[in-house]
Image (spheres, helix red, strand yellow):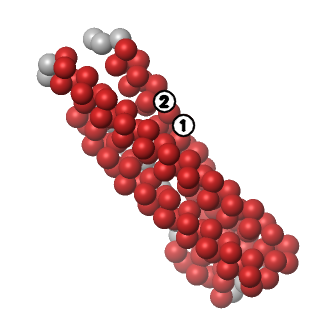
């Protein structure tokens, strides 16, 4: 692969990484909001706080789905320059359903646990994408 083509591939990977980072940060913000509403819900928030929390979880799920698509694009771009990457993001459908219809402290605790797991996955993905971007920028600035 020529230097010019390699530089183009690196630029495309950086762009894909920056887009993924934006999506991941949006997911972080939505998960933080869902966590906060979940805490309120656990301490007696009732039906309306459950509905708001569910809405925030849906928003977070959409952000995570967008981030997953962006990460898949980044993964493709990294394959073009021979850099491996494997990231997974998931949201549990059953727990969000159960939270509204079986509103009690145990289900709320499980939902908070799933929100925490999703936040940890997103935080890990942010860290990994930031590291990849740093490596790509170093590669771009210091060609082989």
Q: Which residue is label 1 attached to? A: 127
- Which residue is located at x 81 percent, y 69 percent? 40
Give the quadrant of the C terminus.
Answer: top left
- Which residue is located at x 58 percent, y 81 percent? 97
The answer to whether residue 125 is above or below residue 88 is above
Q: Spatial distance from mark 2 to mark 1, Cα to Cα?
A: 6 Å
User: Residue 129's spot in the image, x, y percent?
Assistant: 46, 37
- Which residue is located at x 75 percent, y 77 percent? 49
The answer to whether residue 16 is above or below residue 27 is above
Q: Residue furthest bottom?
A: 101
User: Left or right: 18 with respect to 123?
Assistant: left
Residue 85 seen in the figure = no
Residue 112 seen in the figure = yes
Residue contact at pointers 2 and 1, CB within 8 angstroms: yes
Query: In this orientation, which residue lies closer to the viewer: 140 or 95?
Result: 140
Count residues near mark 1 (Cα–Cα under 10 Å), then give few for <14, some for 14-19, many for 20+: few
Q: Residue furthest right?
A: 43
User: Residue 22's spot in the image, x, y percent?
Assistant: 50, 45
- Dot 2 falls on a residue whose secondary structure is helix
The answer to whether residue 114 is above or below residue 96 is above
Report the disc number at residue 131: 2
- Dot 1 falls on a residue whose secondary structure is helix
User: Left or right: 60 with respect to 104?
Assistant: left
Where on the picture, by quarter, is residue 17?
top left
User: Residue 30's spot in the image, x, y percent?
Assistant: 61, 59
The answer to whether residue 44 is above or below residue 90 is below
Count residues near mark 2 (Cα–Cα under 10 Å), then give few for <14, some for 14-19, many for 20+: few
- Which residue is located at x 40 percent, y 22 percent? 137
User: Residue 100's spot in the image, x, y percent?
Assistant: 66, 83
């Amino acid at each position: 692969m020529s230097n010019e083509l390699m530089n183009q591939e690196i630029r495309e990977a950086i762009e894909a990484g920056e887009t993924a980072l934006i999506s991941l940060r949006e997911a972080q913000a939505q998960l933080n909001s869902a966590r906060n509403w979940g805490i309120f819900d656990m301490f007696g928030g009732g039906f309306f706080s459950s509905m708001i929390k569910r809405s925030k979880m849906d928003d977070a799920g959409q952000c995570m789905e967008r981030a997953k698509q962006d990460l898949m694009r980044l993964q493709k771009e990294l394959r073009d320059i021979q850099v491996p990457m494997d990231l997974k993001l998931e949201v549990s459908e059953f727990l969000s359903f159960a939270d509204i219809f079986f509103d009690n402290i145990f289900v709320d605790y499980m939902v908070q646990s799933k929100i925490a797991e999703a936040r940890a996955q997103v935080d890990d993905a942010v860290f990994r994408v930031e590291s990849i971007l740093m490596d790509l920028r170093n590669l771009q600035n210091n060609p082989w």
